[in-house]
Amino acid sequence: MNVGDIVSLVTLSGEYVGQITDLNTTSVSLKDPRMILQSQDGQMGFAKGIAVTGEENPKEVEFRNIVFMTPSNEGIQNAWKDATGQIITPSSNIVV
């Protein structure tokens, strides 16, 4: 994984999605990180922040003590882009 990739990051406190801005052996920094939430009926969404007492919609967060990191699937990447106001480009050629 490289700077600029949109990833799913699992930590002891939960799962987060964001774009890598810095990656090293001890931490990962994510741009516009969003914490994953799941409702009782199985629906998934993003929290407005990553900590109850933290800033709403932080622009960048450094994570340590990561359990694992994986590229996010296309659906999650598009949901993250929509939630953060990123430009969404079609995955195939479409004539409008």
Image: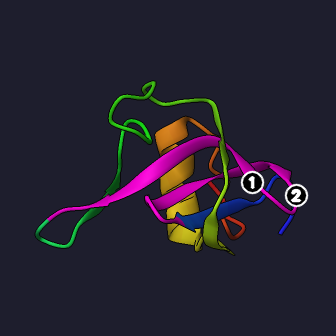
Which of the image's four quarters has the N terminus? bottom right
Name the residue: 66% across, 59% down.
95
At label 1, which amino acid type do we have? Val
Magenta: predominant secondary structure element? strand
> Tag 2: Cα neighbours inside 10 Å, few (<14), some, or many (≥20)?
few
Magenta-colored stretch includes residue 58 = no
The relative height of residue 30 versus residue 49 in the rendered view (above or below) is below
Q: Position of residue 61 (x, y in %)?
A: 64, 39
Q: Is residue 71 visible?
A: no
Q: Position of residue 93 (x, y in %)?
A: 72, 67
Q: Place residue 6 in its image quadrant.
A: bottom right
| Left or right side of 62 for 56 | left
Asked whether the residues under the numbered discs 2 and 1 touch, taking CB atoms below 8 Å apart as contact, a structural biologist would say: yes
Name the residue: 51% across, 64% down.
76
| Residue linked to disc 2 | 24
Name the residue: 48% across, 55% down.
79
Q: Place residue 67 in its image quadrant.
A: bottom right
Region in magenta? 11-39
Q: Is residue 55 visible?
A: yes
Which coloring applies here? rainbow
At label 2, which amino acid type do we have? Asn
**Which residue occupies the foreground of this view, 11 or 75?**
11
Magenta-colored stretch includes residue 14 = yes
Please identify the residue farthest to the top as the structure is shown: 55
Numbered marks: total: 2
**In the structure shown, which secondary structural element does the residue marked by tag 2 occupy?**
loop
Mark sitting on residue 18: none
Q: Position of residue 19 (x, y in %)?
A: 70, 50
User: Label 2 to label 1, Cα distance in Å?
Assistant: 6 Å
| Residue linked to disc 1 | 28
**Which residue occupies the foreground of this view, 51 or 93?**
51
